[in-house]
Image: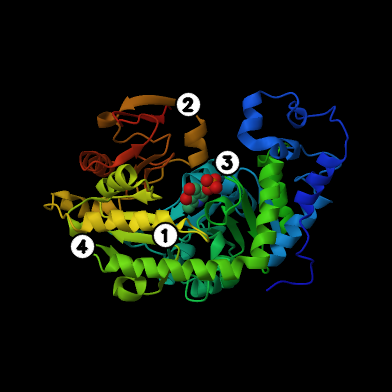
Amino acid sequence: MTGTLDHERKPLLDTLTAYAQSGIYPFHTPGHKGGHCAAPEIAALVGKRGLALDLPAMTATDNTLHPTGCVREAQALAADLFGATETFFLSAGSTLGVATAMLSAVPPGQTIALPRNIHRSVVAGLVLSGAVPRFIPHNVLSECGALGVTVERLAETLDMEPRPAAVLLTRPSYYGLAGDLTEIVALCRSRQVPLIVDEAHGAHLHFVPPGGPVPALAAGADLVVQSCHKTLGSLVGSAQLHVGNRSPIDAMQVRDALNFLQSTSPSYLLLASLDATRHWLWREGRRLFATAVEETKRLEDEIETMPGLRVLRPENDSRLRGHRRDPLRVVVNVSGTGWTGYEVERFLRTEYRVEDEMADWFNVVYLFSPRDDLPARERLLAGLRAVSSSPRPRRGDSQFIDERLLQPPTPPLALAPREAALGRKKVVPLDQAAGQVCAEMVMFYPPGIPLLMPGERVTDDTLDVCRQLRSAGAHPYASDSSLATIRVVDH
Ligand SMILES: Cc1ncc(COP(=O)(O)O)c(C=O)c1O
């Protein structure tokens, strides 16, 4: 599983600990001086030891810009475990990793091919890099959102002029679905186009037993971004950016891009949590995740005995051919009970004290980790049983299954996102926005796909979809949360 490095070591954590125990008084930053000079609540918040280890980049602790000491060694150990040429630790989430990957792979003004189901950090990457998006058409299912792109659609997108400089995919999706990457990797290699995978929700795939989605690095992706905090147990905000073994973008190019974006004061607590997590999972990851997968499968089997509830399982659904599912992300389709996912979410939160990762009209999505609390799992099952045994009359939500709402039309691009997002803007009523160039990102949840991105021309079609989504109860994410107005380019 790993190369020749000594995975018993925890270089970052041990360096911080040694410094904190050395008896040296810090006449340097941070101003809390290991906790002596901080609000008392902060010690209560992170604990004395946490404060003592909350150190800055300095001679003793190395740095993340040009690391030569413990950061370099800890990153090398992570690269070795996950199978990368080089790994960069991030203390500002996958958001930083996605933007870094885009900056390093797409020269200014060039095109990037990507599907429409992207996280907002990708839009930030477009604005920062000056890249121009070209969207790869992909299918969407009402119950489980976006599907993976097919190699045929990707090939068509790569054949268009100007030729894209890179491809970016979101995998796995919010519903844990991951399309097979084999042919996509082969196509990208044959065209010498780097493949970036936003694997924010899939860092743990490295540890799950065969049968789950093949991790992007193992499948041959070039730049892979993972929110370790989401699924590996490291501290919130900690993430990794890996450079694949055959990446045409070399690690130095990635480092250059990262160093334009990252702070000179990354949180060493977050970095050390990545180091500790790597050490823990090197020792026990396979076993822990295998157990978690087994337990989760039993829980799914139990849920499937409950009338009206169904668990998303690609192996049982021909429409999901070519996809695998994250075995620790359980998507419970509740539509057979007459309840909406939102109603189930609220009910289980208030009556059973369990919270989900997300809900939509049809589903509630639960994430499982190694060593989840057993009584909480029982409460979850009890809550779902209660939902199943009290069906409700079906409501008129079927209007949402309008194809256009699931896969909203992609508006024409009138300006590069960078120009639209960073230029002068004005606020206009949404109803009068047709023909204007959007200067912000407008997304509805669900379906979680951007309706408008900076630089796209607002069309009547898109406005119509906005109105329908609003009346169907979807939640808009935009500068005006009621979406009565929208910001457009002020020429
Ligand atoms: C698909 C995807 N990419 C990137 C991110 C950004 O990750 P982070 O919150 O670690 O910055 C998220 C966060 O939810 C995400 O869902």
Left or right of 317 on screen, residue 212: right
Q: Quadrant of the C terminus?
A: top left
Residue where numbered disc 3 is placed: 128
Whether the residues at callouts 1 and 3 have beta carbons within 8 Å, the answer is no
Q: Which of disc 2 and disc 3 is earlier in sequence?
A: 3
Q: Which of disc 4 and disc 2 is earlier in sequence?
A: 4
Whether the residues at callouts 1 and 2 have beta carbons within 8 Å, the answer is no
List x then y, in percent, for residue 203. 56, 60
Local secondary structure at mark 2: loop
What mark, if any, has residue 308 been given in the picture?
4
Check disc 3 and give the amino acid type.
Answer: Leu
Count residues near mark 4 (Cα–Cα under 10 Å), then give few for <14, some for 14-19, many for 20+: some
The mark closer to the camera, 3 or 2, is: 3
Q: CA distance from mark 1 to mark 3?
A: 21 Å
The answer to whether residue 247 of the structure is visible from this angle is: no
Residue where numbered disc 1 is placed: 136
What mark, if any, has residue 424 been given in the picture?
2
Position of residue 468 relative to residue 318, above or below, is: above
Local secondary structure at mark 1: loop
Local secondary structure at mark 4: loop
